């Protein structure tokens, strides 16, 4: 019988050590939100490396992780424009690139950069191990709001499946970054919104499938897995963040976590935006 002790575990270790210990072809989905190398303080030097050193480290852990992914599996990596070109070229030599997703963090317009355009997005690369990758579109469709639905009641739209069940999420994801007032906020400087990670987990990992997060931070991926019946294995090198994750897991398991999973939120995870005003464009198609 296979040793599955590593399943559903949170470990306070270096990701490289953890990844190396996993069996090959065992992972359905990698959600990797590594340091971006922007000089953030994670209680270690991981975000403050020389560019060359950072890229060599990135290629190193990516090379370790790719063999751990099943043939039907995928990898999502969070990054920014500063290193996405190099990282994506590397990944394209090993995997199939499916999407570049732009996460618009909804940064308010208040002055901003004066010698360039203000950067207000993160980049998420979506890569698959093979063309037979798992993707459950129906689990992440975005429902139309009533106003748009009504505006699309003309005969050419009658019976259209997408009008009833919602449309395929686009590659621009507009989701507010987390502020102190948000109830899901933990004490971590770059915590990702649960709704983004839930979308990834639901679309790219089957129920009871296994998700690996090598850089767990505050445990958003673990939360997404527990709330959506997926298995997980995650690593976090900082002991304080590790404590945050274990407490988050405890709250979910004892029923005191008051964040509603997207599957149960009203109208899906992104509030439907009315597209009624855009409908004059439809006469062009
Ligand atoms: C961008 S944050 C992840 C945030 C996470 N997605 C969340 O929603 O909270 C990156 C994390 O990687 C951790 N980290 C850095 N180097 C690491 C390593 N070698 N092994 C494991 N974790 C590491 C940092 O301490 C930091 O918490």
Image (spheres, rainbow, N blue to C red):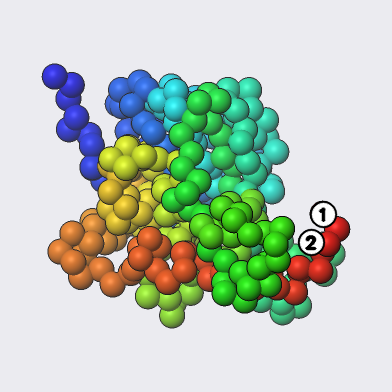
Instruction: Tell me the SS state at disc 1.
Output: loop
Crowding at dot 1, Cα within 10 Å, few <14 / some 14-19 / many 20+, comes out as few
Question: Does the residue tagged 2 have its C-beta within 8 Å of any atom of ligand 1?
Answer: no
Question: According to the image, label 1 marks what residue?
Answer: 285
Quadrant assignment for the N terminus: top left
* Residue 19 screen position, x and y as percent: 36, 30
* Residue 212 placement: quadrant: top left
Question: Does the residue tagged 1 have its C-beta within 8 Å of any atom of ligand 1?
Answer: no
Residue drawn at (59%, 56%) of the image: 159
Numbered marks: total: 2
Instruction: Tell me the SS state at disc 2.
Output: helix
Image vertical order of residue 266 relative to residue 229, above or below: below
Question: According to the image, label 2 marks what residue?
Answer: 282
* Residue 53 screen position, x and y as percent: 58, 35
Residue drawn at (57%, 72%) of the image: 145
Q: Is residue 143 left or right of residue 155?
A: left
Q: Is residue 48 left or right of residue 51?
A: left
Residue drawn at (62%, 33%) of the image: 97
Q: Are marks 1 and 2 in contact (CB under 8 Å)?
A: yes
* Residue 14 screen position, x and y as percent: 35, 38
* Residue 68 placement: quadrant: top left
Image vertical order of residue 58 relative to residue 174, above or below: above
* Residue 137 screen position, x and y as percent: 50, 46
Viewer-side residue, 238 vs 134: 134
How far is mark 1 from mark 2, CA to CA? Answer: 6 Å
Q: Is residue 3 left or right of residue 232?
A: left
Q: Is residue 156 left or right of residue 11?
A: right
Residue drawn at (36%, 31%) of the image: 27
Viewer-side residue, 69 vs 216: 69
């Amino acid at each position: 019988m296979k040793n599955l002790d590593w399943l559903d575990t949170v470990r306070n270790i270096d990701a490289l050590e953890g990844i190396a210990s996993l069996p090959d072809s065992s992972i359905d989905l990698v959600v990797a939100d590594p340091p971006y190398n922007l000089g953030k303080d994670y209680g270690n030097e991981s975000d403050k490396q020389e560019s060359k050193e950072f890229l060599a480290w990135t290629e190193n852990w990516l090379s370790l992780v790719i063999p751990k992914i099943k043939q039907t599996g995928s990898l999502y990596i969070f990054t920014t424009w500063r290193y996405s070109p190099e990282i994506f070229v590397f990944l394209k030599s090993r995997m199939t690139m499916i999407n570049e997703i732009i996460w618009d963090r909804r940064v308010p317009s208040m002055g901003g950069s004066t010698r360039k355009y203000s950067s207000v997005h993160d980049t998420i690369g979506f890569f698959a191990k093979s063309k037979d990758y798992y993707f459950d579109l129906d689990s992440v469709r975005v429902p139309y709001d009533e106003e748009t639905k009504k505006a699309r009641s003309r005969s050419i739209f009658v019976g259209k499946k997408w009008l009833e069940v919602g449309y395929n999420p686009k590659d621009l994801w507009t989701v507010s970054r987390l502020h102190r007032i948000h109830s899901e906020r933990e004490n971590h400087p770059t915590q990702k919104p649960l709704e983004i990670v839930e979308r990834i987990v639901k679309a790219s990992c089957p129920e009871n499938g296994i998700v690996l997060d090598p850089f767990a931070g505050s445990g958003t991926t673990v939360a997404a897995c527990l709330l959506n019946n997926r298995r997980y294995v995650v690593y976090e090198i900082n002991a304080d963040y590790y404590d945050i994750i274990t407490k988050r897991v405890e709250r979910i398991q004892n029923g005191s976590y008051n964040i509603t999973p997207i599957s149960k939120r009203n109208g899906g995870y992104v509030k439907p935006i009315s597209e009624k005003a855009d409908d004059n464009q439809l006469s062009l198609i």
